[in-house]
């Protein structure tokens, strides 16, 4: 079964600073990313309805090519759902040890 996340670009208040903001699953999940050293994309925080906001300390960044693809994708008018899902799941997988396992499981963001 294919899970439909329906990722979308969004904004957040000034108090929640990040470079890029995405939401999914009818606004049940919000995922924030930053551009870090070497123009790499890093997962900054992820919030889940029912769990709260998980702020990542010292997150691992995507590799150069994946970061380039993420930036290319985020700059498009319409997100390619397949591509952005792959990149988001890679970022989550890199940092999975620091994200609530129960939330990832419930929202199916830990599945390839």
Image: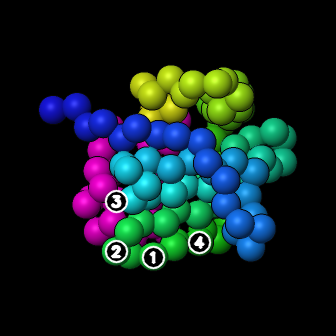
Of helix, strand and loop, which one carries label 4?
strand
The Cα–Cα distance between marks 4 and 1, rounded to whole angstroms, is 10 Å
Residue extending farthest to the left is 1
Q: How is the image coloured?
A: rainbow
Circle nearer the viewer, 4 or 1 = 1
Mark before the other along the chain sequence, 3 or 4: 4
Tell me the residue that label 1 is attached to.
52
Please, is residue 25 above or below residue 16 in the view?
A: above
> Which of the two residues, 73 or 6, is positioned nearer the viewer here?
6
Residue 13, picture quadrant: bottom right
Tell me the residue that label 4 is attached to.
55
Q: Residues within 10 Å of mark 2 (few under 14, many from 20)?
A: few
Tell me the residue that label 3 is attached to.
104
Of helix, strand and loop, which one carries label 3?
helix
Please state the horizontal and vertical placement of residue 51, each as a whole percent of the image: 38, 75
Q: Is residue 60 left or right of residue 100?
A: right
Taking the spot 26% from the left edge, 37% from the top edge, the residue there is: 3
Taking the spot 47% from the left edge, 40% from the top edge, the residue there is: 7
Q: Residues within 10 Å of mark 1 (few under 14, many from 20)?
A: few
Taking the spot 43% from the left edge, 55% from the top edge, the residue there is: 27
Q: Residues within 10 Å of mark 3 (few under 14, many from 20)?
A: some
Tell me the residue that label 2 is attached to.
50
Tell me where the magenta segment starts and ends, as one range. 87-112
């Amino acid at each position: 079964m294919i899970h439909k996340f329906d990722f979308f670009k969004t904004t957040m208040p000034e108090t929640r600073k990040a470079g890029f903001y995405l939401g999914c699953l009818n606004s049940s999940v919000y995922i924030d990313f930053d551009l870090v050293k070497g123009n790499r994309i890093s997962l900054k925080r992820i919030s889940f309805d029912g769990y709260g906001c998980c702020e990542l300390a010292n997150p691992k960044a995507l590799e150069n090519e994946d970061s380039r693809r993420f930036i290319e994708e985020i700059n498009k008018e319409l997100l390619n759902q397949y591509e952005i899902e792959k990149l988001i799941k890679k970022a989550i997988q890199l940092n999975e040890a620091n994200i609530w396992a129960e939330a990832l499981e419930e929202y199916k963001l830990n599945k390839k």
